[in-house]
Amino acid sequence: MHFDKEFDASGLSCPMPIVRTKKSLRDMATGQVLRVVATDPGSVCDMAAFAEETGNTLLASTTEASRFVFFLRKA
């Protein structure tokens, strides 16, 4: 999937992946896609809730080699 920016949250524990994702989205234009990579299993539920609460779209959520990968479109 095409993305405009990537943020690697590997090694960060809750709530830091969400906090840093929010900061990364701040610098992006509406409609751009952010790819987030995380290792915290809690990020799966957290990222879905974050997208719903903020109006950003969670385009995909996958697992690659024990890492969780998310694609978010900025609202």
Image (cartoon, helix red, strand yellow):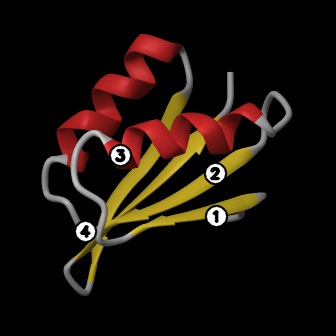
Which residue does the numbered mark 2 point to in the structure image? 34
For marks 1 and 3 on the same chain, the one whose residue lies earlier in the sequence: 1
Which of the 4 image quadrants contains residue 22? top right
Is 32 on the left or on the right of 13, as rendered?
A: right
The residue lying furthest to the right in this view is 29
Q: Callout 3, which amino acid?
A: Met
Gap between marks 3 and 2 measured at Cα: 16 Å
* For discs 3 and 2, the disc positioned in front in the rendered view: 3
Which residue does the numbered mark 4 point to in the structure image? 39
- Mark 2 in CB contact with mark 1 (< 8 angstroms): yes
Mark 1 surroundings within 10 Å by alpha-carbon count, few (fewer than 14), some (14 through 19), many (20 or more): some
Report the disc number at residue 70: none
**Split into 4 quadrants, where in the image is the C terminus?**
top right
For marks 3 and 4 on the same chain, the one whose residue lies earlier in the sequence: 3
Report the disc number at residue 6: 1
Identify the residue at horizontal 38%, vertical 26% (top origin): 50
Gap between marks 3 and 4 measured at Cα: 11 Å
